[in-house]
Amino acid sequence: MRRLRVLVLLHSDLFPPDEIPSQKEWEFAEWKTEFDVRQSLVEAGHQVELLGVDEDLRVIKDAIEKHQPHIVFNLLEEFAGRATFDQHVVSYLEMLGVKYTGCNPRGLMISRSKDLAKKLLTYHRIPNPNFFVFSAARKIQLPKRMPYPLFVKSLTEEASLGITQDSIVTNDRELKDRINYFADKLGSDVIAERFVDGREFYVGVLGNERLTILPPWELFFDHLPERTPKIATRKVKWDARYRKKYGIEAGPARDLDTATVDRIQQTAKRTYRALGLSGYARIDMRMDQSGVIHVIEANPNPDIGIGDEFAESARTHGLDHSQVMDKILSLGLHWDPPGT
């Protein structure tokens, strides 16, 4: 790929250091992904500028006018503290006529609204757990017969925010406690879906029209205490020390025959297209005891740091981190909003 001027949008509190950190500092740093992306873009020969963004769109326009980037590399997961506002930043870039990486605004909006995404999946006959939605602003009214156990999470927040071992509920009292927890702590509506007890898979997808489906990755809980629910809590996803303590790791899916791998990858492809995604995404799934694949959710613009599920799966597919960055850039350069 030709040398590009790349403007990287990131959260101001995740600005990486200029100097290469120690292995330990890098491994546990909150800015690890931001550091990895910048490093790989530079190693690929691109001219990189970083821009910290909080709640002012004008800084983006000013930086674009100053640096005249060929493309904006979007690492924002929220705007003004709202996860659902990231789609507006991308819409703003489209209105400015600027190329950007990652998912389009419509795909972000649909995926962030978990209930809407699940309705679309159901329409396209893509298996996903049945669900109920509860509003933080209304009195809790439970259906007469709830199909416990249920997995309770925020309707709109990402990155496993608020998910703990208590997210698996087995009765009305526990469900009401979790609904109140999300209402009080996050001000968030809740989605409670049937808990699929089984294996958890992540499948990376790259592409706009033509898609590259990466090998299935699996989350392993080999040393988790007995009777502890095997779910991706916030600690499991983001606390490297916790993962090391309990031997929780992700890696190539084990002991799957070719037909099952194909079913998983085809489900990921169908999900990506059904939700109108572009750029890159990770599709999270669970396989129950009878072998049925259930889509849990789609994650556009997932974590792409070195060592994370997406990048590691891409590496087994033959793409090193710099090549993944170039692929993401190329997809952004070739994406045009509908109607243009």
Image (cartoon, helix red, strand yellow):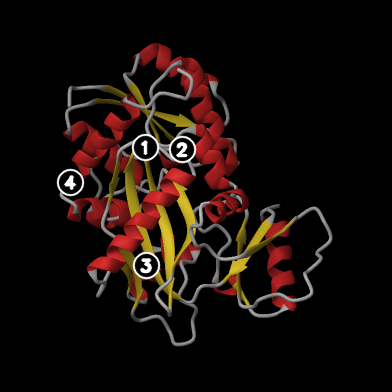
Q: Amino acid at mark 4?
A: Asp
Q: Amino acid at mark 1?
A: Gly
Q: Nearer the viewer, mark 3 or mark 4?
A: 4
Residue tagged 1: 279
Q: Nearer the viewer, mark 3 or mark 2?
A: 2
Badge 3 density bin: few <14, some 14–19, many ≥20, Cα 10 Å: some
Answer yes or no: is residue 287 visible. yes
Residue 55 drawn above or below residue 243: above
Badge 1 density bin: few <14, some 14–19, many ≥20, Cα 10 Å: many
Residue 290 location in percent, x, y? 42, 79
Q: Amino acid at mark 2?
A: Leu
Dot 4: what SS?
Answer: loop
- CA gap, disc 3 and disc 2: 25 Å
Q: Nearer the viewer, mark 2 or mark 1?
A: 1
Badge 2 density bin: few <14, some 14–19, many ≥20, Cα 10 Å: many
Residue tagged 2: 76
User: Which label's residue is closer to the chain start, 3 or 4?
Assistant: 3
Residue 182 location in percent, x, y? 68, 60
Q: Residue furthest right?
A: 139
Quarter of the image that includes the N terminus: top left
Q: Please report contact status of discs 2 and 1: CB closer than 8 Å, yes or no.
A: no
Residue tagged 3: 241
Answer yes or no: is residue 25 visible. no
Give the total of numbered labels: 4
Label placed on residue 320: 4
Residue 71 drawn above or below residue 189: above
Q: Nearer the viewer, mark 3 or mark 1?
A: 1
Q: Please report contact status of discs 3 and 4: CB closer than 8 Å, yes or no.
A: no
- CA gap, disc 2 and disc 4: 23 Å
In-front residue for pair 201/17: 201
The residue depicted at 29 percent of the width and 61 percent of the height is 262
The residue depicted at 68 percent of the width and 68 percent of the height is 178
